[in-house]
Amino acid sequence: MGVLRFDKATPLSKPVRLPNGFVRAEGYLTRAGIFVYRDAQGNTVREFRPPEEVFNPESLASFALMPVTNDHPSELLTADNAKQYAVGSVSDAVVPEGDLVRAGLMITDAAAIEALDAGKSELSCGYTADVTIEPGVWRGQKYDAVQRNIRGNHVALVDAGRAGPAC
């Protein structure tokens, strides 16, 4: 079943301010591993994001050049609404690094840059995935379901990230 997910990651590298006021930074967008979500009934579900899915070339490519938003929008980004939410973009180089996914970002919106200056420095991916109930164990941790066919929609600047401080 295809679902929408938001996964918070780690802080950005120290941002570099360009002469035109834009900001360039690098960060980890997400990681392989087990993430905790709430289902429609409010139950806790532990979803496994296998490395072979997170680092699948189609998954990585789906985050390249995606819009960056200031917090998550209330809807998926489309050609009809992206201008309303976009404050920058992800680079076209989205690469695996250990269990993490790394990319550069360019922030072009003054309000988002002010938020970065005020300490907002973590990232959170907005994406879709097919989730199947498949209990198992990964690195000694139990999970309830598996995410497959992960496809990026946007990367949000957030105050605190789900994927942990490494991202």
Image: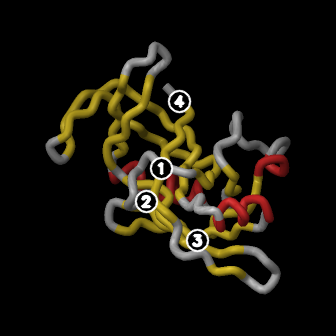
Mark 4 or 1 closer to N-term?
A: 4
Q: Name the residue under label 4.
A: 2
In the rendered view, would you say 57 is above or below 23?
A: above
Name the secondary structure under disc 1.
loop
Mark 4 or 2: the one toward you: 2
**Mark 3 to mark 2 CA distance (whole Å):** 13 Å
Mark 3 or 1: the one toward you: 1
Residue 108 image-quadrant placement: bottom right
Q: Residue furthest top?
A: 41
Picture disc at residue 161: 1
Q: Position of residue 83 (x, y in %)?
A: 84, 51
Name the secondary structure under disc 4.
strand
Mark 3 or 4 closer to N-term?
A: 4
Asked whether residue 155 is in view, the answer is no
Q: Which quarter of the rendering shows the C terminus? A: bottom left
Amino acid identity at mark 2: Cys
Mark 3 or 1 closer to N-term?
A: 3
**Mark 4 to mark 1 CA distance (whole Å):** 22 Å
The image's colouring method is secondary structure
Mark 4 or 2 closer to N-term?
A: 4
Looking at the picture, tell me which residue is in the foreground, 138 or 25: 25
Amino acid identity at mark 1: Gly
Q: Position of residue 104 (x, y in %)?
A: 58, 71
